[in-house]
Amino acid sequence: MRVRQGNVQDWPFMYALGKDVIPASISPWRKQPMEDTLKYREKILKGFWTWIQQTDSRVFIAETEKGEPMGYLVLYPSSREELTGVLQTWIMDFAVLPKYRRQGVGRTLMESAEQYSREQGIPYLGLAVSSHNLHALQLYEMLGFAEERKLMVKVLD
């Protein structure tokens, strides 16, 4: 496996995988037809590559030795923590194809983001994860991430 800098040629892979991973990230508190959620996600994804370029974000692509993409990570290097204003890198999007999960691909992508952040002298790496996504939570905790805040929701009648 190797990790390389992504480019616009990777966009079709990222777009398709970005849509496929949505069901694992949706909160069980959000009651909405999956079709509506996917339409919303597609709308967001359509402008995502432009946003990546405009913000000087970094895309990391994990691929097999034969060049088959396995997963991706989008890193926003100019994020500011909302309370302190401290500079941090922020993982905007992260996905691994199902057939490559639990094989170290996610870990390798995360380590690439961490290495980039260190090289840039940025002291923090942040992300958001759905609290019910137990596999992702286990990975992040194993990599040394700590819970900093809780995002809460109340379902109104």
Image (cartoon, rainbow, N blue to C red):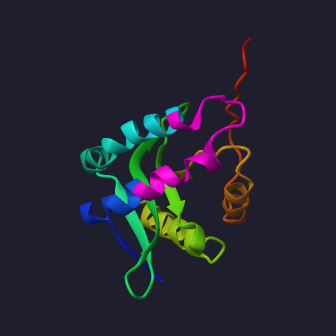
Q: Is residue 135 above or below residue 108?
A: above
Res. 119 image quadrant: bottom left
Residue at horizontal 47%, vertical 69%? Answer: 112
User: The magenta stretch spans which residues?
Assistant: 16-35
Q: Position of residue 85 (x, y in %)?
A: 48, 35
Q: Between residues 118 and 47, which one lies in front from this camera angle? A: 47
**Which residue is the extreme one toward the bottom?**
65
Q: Is residue 126 above or below residue 111?
A: above
Q: Position of residue 95 (x, y in %)?
A: 52, 59
Magenta-drawn stretch contains 34: yes
Q: Is residue 47 left or right of residue 154?
A: left
Residue at horizontal 46%, vertical 58%? Answer: 17
Q: Between residues 110 and 10, which one lies in front from this camera angle? A: 10
Q: Between residues 59 and 144, which one lies in front from this camera angle? A: 59
Whether residue 23 appears in this view of the structure is: yes
Whether residue 122 appears in this view of the structure is: no
Q: Is residue 157 left or right of residue 6?
A: right
Q: Is residue 66 above or below residue 111?
A: below
Res. 66 image quadrant: bottom left
Q: Position of residue 77 (x, y in %)?
A: 39, 51
Magenta-drawn stretch contains 52: no
Residue at horizontal 38%, vertical 63%? Answer: 13
